[in-house]
Amino acid sequence: MSRALNIRESEEHIASACAVRNFRITAIETLASGGTRVVLSNAVDCAQIAKLYAKKLIPGVVRRQPIRLQRAL
């Protein structure tokens, strides 16, 4: 199972929910298409968050913002 989820919720809300449950987030970002992408440190925690946000999970491919700037050649 993947450790990444796309959820229709704010970064702050997801971070707070993970903090309450002592789940470690390895990456979190706001999606260009709306919602948040969160990557948890293990699949067990990810499965529990997926259950918690079951009705807010975003299926399929989502548009993401580029995280790093590309260098000019």
Image: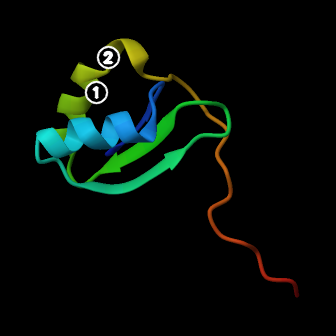
Nearest the camera: 61 or 65? 65
Horizontally, is 10 left or right of 45 in the view? right
Nearest the camera: 71 or 19? 19
Label 2 neighbour load within 10 Å: few <14, some 14-19, many 20+: few
Q: Amino acid at mark 2?
A: Ala
Measured as percent of width and height from the top left, residue 61 is found at 60, 32
Say which element carries label 2.
helix
Task: State the residue position of label 1.
Answer: 50
On screen, residue 13 above or below 8: below
- Residue occupying the point 28% across, 27% down: 50
On screen, residue 49 above or below 12: above
Measured as percent of width and height from the top left, residue 59 is found at 51, 22
- Residue occupying the point 35% across, 34% down: 13
Q: Are marks 1 and 2 in contact (CB under 8 Å)?
A: yes
Task: State the residue position of label 2.
Answer: 54
Horizontally, is 17 left or right of 3 in the view? left
In the image, farthest residue toward the right: 73
Say which element carries label 1.
helix
Measured as percent of width and height from the top left, residue 56 is found at 41, 17
Label 1 neighbour load within 10 Å: few <14, some 14-19, many 20+: some
On screen, residue 34 above or below 39: above
On screen, residue 8 above or below 12: above
The quarter of the displayed image where residue 16 is located = top left
